[in-house]
Image: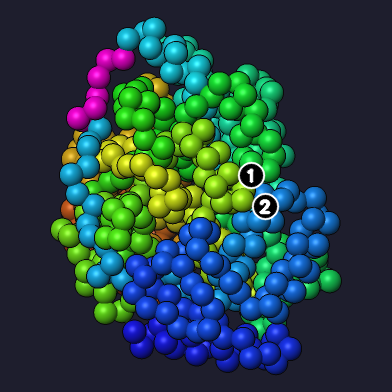
Amino acid sequence: MQRSLLCVALVLACATPSLGGSSYTPNLNLRGGMFRLGGFLRTNSFGNLDSPNLVAPEGKVVFDEIKTLMAGEGLSESAIGAFKQAYEALVRGDDGMIAEISITPAEDLPTLADVSTDVPDDKVKELLGKTVVMKLNGGLGTGMGLEKAKSLLPVKGDQSFLDLIAKQVEYFAKNKGDVRQMFMNSFSTSADTKEALKGHPSIIAGDWEVVQNKVPKIHAETLRPCKFPAEPKMEWCPPGHGDLYPSLAGSGALKKLLDAGVKYMFVSNSDNLGATLDLSLLNFFAESDKSFVMEVCERTASDKKGGHLAVRKQDGQLLLRESAQCTEEDEPAFQDTNKHKYFNTNNLWIRLDKLQEVLDKHDGVVPLPMIKNSKTVDPKDDNSAKVFQLETAMGAAIESFAGAGAIVVGRERFAPVKTCADLLRVRSDAYEVTEDCRLVLVKECAGTPPAVDLDKKIYKKVQGLDQMLACGEVPSLKACKTLSVKGKVVLEKGTAFKGDVKIVNPTDEWCVLKSGTYCDETVNLDAPNVDKLSADQLKEMVKKLQVAA
């Protein structure tokens, strides 16, 4: 409670003067309908547009400015409407908290094992004719130091995410049947993706992509669009993968798909190579007549700080609660993986006709909680203006679809790459590529991937990981439970880790870990006889590997 009240105080302190010194009061609400603050009417659940949804008059004036700005960039009414929803939440001071007392755990969910079946060939053909597979491919991976689509990164040998996705589609077409394939790219990834897929002309034929919208960065003090004349493109940012819905609607892609008789959409991230079109899941989704189904996995101790699925007491609706939506006093319950057992894989099954109904009901918008990211307008300059980047997440739409459901799947359908530690894990022998080009855990891992912790000061960006692997070989991790690397470490070829291993280099030099098998031990690389490499030597080694690739 104290943290929530502090949030209100901070918004009041900075937002009120920025809007001409008016006396408007931002509003705070716990999303279970628990209490209200402020002078404006507030719905029981964020985005419930059936209830009065008022913001300060000054906020409306500012949004008129934003609307003109976005329209001038050629953005659709759907994109503008979605951003309006997020912006109004910002000026209300809405923190989107979900109180533990307002929810119950999600229980008694079906599993993939429950629904696995051999689907008759004639039914397969019928279902595939009504299905489209959508890969979300808008991320640049800037957090990993990349300037191109993250899906262009090599993930197994010289094969990138996009290479394996293309092979998945081609294998499926050859062995099971043709199905529509689309990508949601961003204005930063569209050209690179098309170039990378030019060797697969069937994939990029016709209406193969929708392009993610862009939204203005909001000045943290004025709550107006931030100006950056030195580089105007930095005034804009991606709106998160919740933009799937306005992108489909605003581009006309949704109407085209519905007109073509397409009813089912399977969506997943391009960096999750475990997420392929599964015929048993498709058949389950079609027979369930549900509007929206989320694939979830069972949480483990390593997942306790991530979001979880829950049920709203008020109406029995499924919803997602993220860590940012949890008060400090509710954190023990939030992190209790025995209580809240499931997390979102971001593999979603969406009935397109039901999506259209949601859009029609809410004036062309899918109600989604706003995610506020505090940044600087120039991400490379910490002294540049502070901004808010407003995003939404597509999985949060589960609470906007009446009759939504969830299904429990194994970790073989969840192998995302968000960090260099993830990348090292999937590049290693802990994962293998199946005949149908899925990336799955090897049997030696017994369903649990090795937990990899790399020093974020050194390995946050891919360049740091390249230096660790400058000798040209990824270490063996298939028998590893946990691996921690602190400091600058270069791994020789022929290195294997088993059990729980920690490598520590307390010096400021790049030290070489000799080849061999390291099992349940801590290795300190501060001895005088440890081999060291200069920055120039490492740079040359990495360069040779890149040329060879």
| Drawn side of residue 95 relative to residue 313, left or right | right
- As for residue 115 lying within the magenta part, the answer is yes
Q: Quadrant of residue 304?
A: bottom left
Q: Secondary structure at mark 2?
A: helix
Residue at the spot of label 1: 247
Residue 345 to residue 221: above or below = above
Return the residue nearer the eye: 98 or 493.
98
What residue type is disc 1 on? Ser
Depth check: give the residue in front, 299 or 317.
Answer: 317
Q: Is residue 462 above or below residue 170?
A: below
Region in magenta: 113-119
Residue for point 26% across, 79% down: 329
Tell me where residue 156 sits by quadrant: top left
Residue found 21% across the figure and 30% down from its top: 113
Q: Is residue 233 visible?
A: no
Q: Residue sitting at 62 percent across and 24 percent down?
A: 259
Percent across and percent down for residue 369 are: 48, 62
**Tag 1: Cα neighbours inside 10 Å, few (<14), some, or many (≥20)?**
many
**Could you tell me residue 386's position as x and y percent?**
65, 79
Which numbered tag is attached to residue 79?
Answer: 2
Q: Which mark is residue 202?
A: none
Q: Quadrant of the C terminus?
A: top right
- Closer to us: 453 or 265: 265
Q: Contact, CB < 8 Å: mark 2 with mark 1? A: yes
